[in-house]
Amino acid sequence: MNYRTDKYGNRLSILGFGCMRFTRKVGIDYAKAEREIMAAYRGGVNYFDTAYIDPGSEALLGAVLEKNGIRDNVYIATKLPYYLIKDTAGMEKLFREELRRLRTDHIDYYFMHMLADIEVWKRLQDMGIEGWIAEKKKNGQIRQVGFSYHGGSDMF
């Protein structure tokens, strides 16, 4: 596996594992997903990307990492779905649920999910996102932040 070092000194596999589309029967096929995650891990993948809105993804990833004792050896990225929150209390509630699902006390890379235009960012600012993030970073619950952009190139 090849790795890159980010600006914080983290050595990340250049290939990440996206947890959005695990095989499903009625729910996620846990055994198959665990085999896939562990095969990626044994192959050197140390970056796992999930999201609050991917049904069962965060919980499955957290359970697999905990069961196999590898949480401290990987980086988890997950996302804040701004369209599900109305205020800082909503951010906090959702974030605590993510920590519980992922069975961890911190998120390595926390993204504002699906930003589509500057108005969305302004709305988050009005809700207090910058202070909320600063506090989470200060207490170590969020290590790095970013965003995923889903708007047009002219707005970007």
Image (cartoon, grey):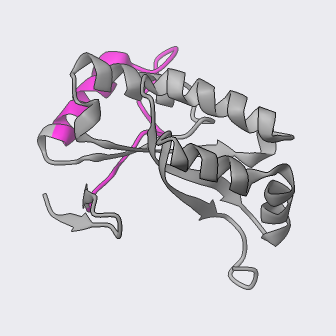
Which region shows up in magenta? 14-41
Q: Position of residue 154 (x, y in %)?
A: 74, 85
Q: Residue furthest bottom?
A: 154
Specify whether 35 is left or right of 123: left
Please tell me which residue is depicted at 22% across the width and 30% down the height of the picture: 70
Specify whether 22 is left or right of 66: right
- The quarter holding residue 126 reads bottom right
- The quarter holding residue 41 reads top left
Q: Quadrant of the C terminus?
A: bottom right
Please tell me which residue is depicted at 79% across the width and 45% down the height of the picture: 83
Q: Position of residue 4 (x, y in %)?
A: 24, 67
Q: Position of residue 20 (x, y in %)?
A: 49, 40
Q: Is residue 120 above or below residue 61?
A: below
- The quarter holding residue 49 reads top left
Q: Is residue 35 above or below residue 109?
A: above
Q: Specify whether residue 73 is painted magenta.
A: no
Please tell me which residue is depicted at 79% across the width and 55% down the height of the picture: 124
Specify whether 88 is left or right of 63: right
Q: Quadrant of the N terminus?
A: bottom left
Q: Position of residue 122 (x, y in %)?
A: 84, 64
Q: Specify whether residue 28 is painted magenta.
A: yes
Q: Nearer the viewer, residue 131 or 25?
A: 131
How many numbered dots are placed on residues in this image?
0
Q: Nearer the viewer, residue 99 or 27?
A: 99
Q: Nearer the viewer, residue 35 or 147?
A: 147
